[in-house]
Image (spheres, rainbow, N blue to C red):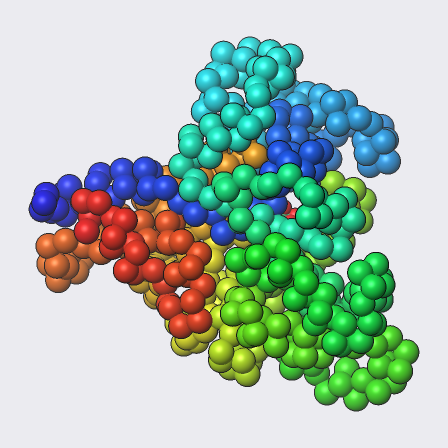
């Protein structure tokens, strides 16, 4: 086995992080068998909501939101390309992402010529199943976890017993935002459709039923920006009133339906804290209207303490919450931190978070998830993150205490490649063992 020195450990580590096959714990990708719901290709890449939001900062005044969203996908994509890639230099992270993706697909010449037609022609030639496989292979992603929402009708129809099988490159997650929101009205609608009682038992049965269909890795919800646990006294004192009128609130649904079913089925609960939904409603048609709010990390800690047998996974949207959250993760056995989410998924913030998390948690966290909505985004999101995570880890590993390291330093690849089973076990703090096993020469 090669003995690494402070001089050689850096390049070796960068190479390992670049080459390790990762597991992507949260995306919005869907399989080819889901037909139109599966997003792929240049026009989906260009109309990604990060880019549409950016486009509106520079769009001519006559392009109103209404006008834009009334256009076809192709027309929208033309406008974004013209506004952000032709008339301006594409230097934001979302723009750079498109460039990296196209380069990785061998389309440098078309990019240099700003040849959107040529790029479209290339995508039109791909055969979808092969293309999916090719992208996962090029991105070095072993598998990605989807976001499966049972109460979205167009999605649910793809989970009927007779539906086509899903590629093994994608695993499932049961997304249940309406439970954490306490949106009893929408839950009742879903229960009615399934012929279930509009009661707490009916709600539990609903979760069990969909967990049975999906066989998910976890249940997931993003919480409202002002989410508190336990519910503040004022809200609790309203309960009898609210209950008579509208059924159950967020805390009740969490405590009496979500948690018991997760315990019963040994499923972790993945939370996403800090999205301020619909902050800019004009952009809602493309999913781009949400803002960020500082979340109440103490609520998360209280929840984990109340249900020690449940494994919680967490990511937060606000940079301001990150340090406090890292401390809470270090102290809380049933809590696992994952990824740099959305507005934190930018190189400068990934670098800062990876250094801080490694300093405080070692390898007992999951460094990144992609959140891809469009298949080919796997290429850029992972390429960019691997580079930054690698560099941040080199700094952590080659700092002053090198002399104290054992000859073979622990492998950082654990941060990216731990399979869900290990990450998700109730009391596993990370994936040290597996990392060691997968670590190649950094073992
Ligand atoms: O990153 C995104 O695409 C967001 O729109 C959200 O979907 C977010 O990631 C979420 O899962 O709620
Ligand atoms: Zn997401």
Q: Nearer the viewer, residue 337 or 220?
A: 220
Above or below 143: residue 61: above
Q: Nearer the viewer, residue 51 or 414?
A: 414
Q: Residue furthest front?
A: 162
Q: Percent x, y for residue 142? A: 42, 42
Q: Percent x, y for residue 100? A: 48, 28
Q: Quadrant of residue 45?
A: top right
Say how many tags the image has: 0
Q: Residue furthest right?
A: 245
Q: Residue at x 68, y 79 (%)?
A: 256
Q: Nearer the viewer, residue 323 or 268?
A: 268
Above or below 326: residue 391: above
Q: Residue 293, can we see it?
A: no
Q: Residue at x 48, y 31 (%)?
A: 133
Q: Residue at x 76, y 51 (%)?
A: 152
In the image, taking residue 35 as reference, residue 382 lies left or right, namely left
Q: Percent x, y for residue 395? A: 27, 50
């Amino acid at each position: 086995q090669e003995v690494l020195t402070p001089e050689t450990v850096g390049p070796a580590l960068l190479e390992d992080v670049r080459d390790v096959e990762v597991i992507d714990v949260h995306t919005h990708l869907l399989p080819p068998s889901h037909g139109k719901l599966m997003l792929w290709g240049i026009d989906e890449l260009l109309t990604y909501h990060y880019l549409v939001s950016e486009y509106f900062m520079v769009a001519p005044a006559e392009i109103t939101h209404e006008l834009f969203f009334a256009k076809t996908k192709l027309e929208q994509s033309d406008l974004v390309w013209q506004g952000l890639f032709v008339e301006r230099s594409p230097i934001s992270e979302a723009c750079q992402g498109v460039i990296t993706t196209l380069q990785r697909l061998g389309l440098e010449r078309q990019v240099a010529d700003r040849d959107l037609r040529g790029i479209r022609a290339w995508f039109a030639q791909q055969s979808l199943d092969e293309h999916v496989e090719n992208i996962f292979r090029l991105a070095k992603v072993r598998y990605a976890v989807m976001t499966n929402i049972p109460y979205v009708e167009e999605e649910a129809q793809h989970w009927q017993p007779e539906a086509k099988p899903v590629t093994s490159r994608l695993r499932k997650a049961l997304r249940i935002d309406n439970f954490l929101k306490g949106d009893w009205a929408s839950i009742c609608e879903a229960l009615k459709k399934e012929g279930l009682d509009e009661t707490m038992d009916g709600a539990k049965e609903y979760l069990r039923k969909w967990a049975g269909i999906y066989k998910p890795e976890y249940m997931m919800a993003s919480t409202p920006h002002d989410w508190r646990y336990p519910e503040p006294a004022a809200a609790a004192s309203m309960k009898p009133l609210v209950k008579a009128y509208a059924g159950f609130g967020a805390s009740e649904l969490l405590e009496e339906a979500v948690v018991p079913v997760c315990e019963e089925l040994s499923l972790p609960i993945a939370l996403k804290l800090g999205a301020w939904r619909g902050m800019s409603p004009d952009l809602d048609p493309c999913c781009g209207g949400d803002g960020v709010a500082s979340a109440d990390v103490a609520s998360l800690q209280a929840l984990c303490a109340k249900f020690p047998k449940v494994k919680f996974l967490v990511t937060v949207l606000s940079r301001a919450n990150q340090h406090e959250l890292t401390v809470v993760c270090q102290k809380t056995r049933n809590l696992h931190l994952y990824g740099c989410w959305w507005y934190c998924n930018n190189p400068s913030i990934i670098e800062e978070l990876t250094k801080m998390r490694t300093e405080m948690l070692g390898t007992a966290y999951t460094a990144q998830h992609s959140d891809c909505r469009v298949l080919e985004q796997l290429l850029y999101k992972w390429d960019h993150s691997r580079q930054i995570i690698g560099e941040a880890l080199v700094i952590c590993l080659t700092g002053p205490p090198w002399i104290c390291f054992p000859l073979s330093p622990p492998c950082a690849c654990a941060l990216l490649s731990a399979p869900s089973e290990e990450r998700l076990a109730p009391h596993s703090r990370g994936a040290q063992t597996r990392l060691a096993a997968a670590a190649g020469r950094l073992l």
